[in-house]
Amino acid sequence: EDYASTSLPAGVPPPSFEMPKVALPYHVRVLVPCYKEELEICQRTVLAAAAAPLPARCRRTVYLCDDGRDKAKRDWIRSLGDSTQFVYVSGRERKKGEMNGKSANLNNVCSQLYPKDVAVVPGNELVCVFDADQVRGVWRERERERVKKKRKTKEKKKKIISATETGCLKNLK
């Protein structure tokens, strides 16, 4: 007995289906969910995902899953030209009171990739998710800028306190 038949209720036969015949062994679908991240952050992650090496005969599609409906992101994906490699997905219908969220965003995209009438996701499909800020360089640059700005603000506050105490506030920039 195989695992499928032992995991089903008694008397229920295992599903029978034929594996799809495909020209390429795997289709890698990279989902990059975003909401209000800056375009530059999304660009780096999408391009890095598209440039990652794949085994021979595999193909990939990178989906920018935009829950924020950002026209600049949509236009940028379209500017890349190859609609079989880059896809912009947006327009999720929100139920009353529903908040934005990564899981709802991803469920929306997956329901478009694999509609309910599809009984079985093809065995040659691989779906992976990268956060919009997955490429560390962008995050590190932003974090350095934030820390530097915070440090400057602290130093300026110290100067103001010092100048106030000595009565030299008028020459402080």
Image: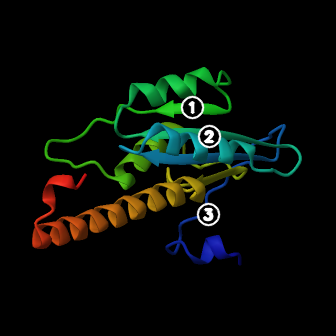
Q: Which residue, given by chain and number where applicable, does mark 3 sit on?
A: 14
The x and y percentages for residue 13 are: 59, 64
The x and y percentages for residue 157 are: 22, 66
- From the viewer's perspective, tell me whether residue 96 is left or right of residue 25: left
- From the viewer's perspective, tell me whether residue 64 is left or right of residue 49: left
Q: Residue at x 28, y 48 (%)?
A: 100
Residue 87 bears which disc, if any? 1
Q: Residue at x 65, y 41 (%)?
A: 47
Residue 37: name its quadrant: top left
Under tag 1, what secondary structure? strand
Q: Which residue, given by chain and number where applicable, does mark 2 sit on?
A: 62
Residue 104 bears which disc, if any? none
Residue 1: name its quadrant: bottom right
Mark 2 crowd level (few <14, some 14–19, many ≥20, 10 Å Cα): many
Under tag 2, what secondary structure? strand
The amino acid type found where label 1 is placed reads Val
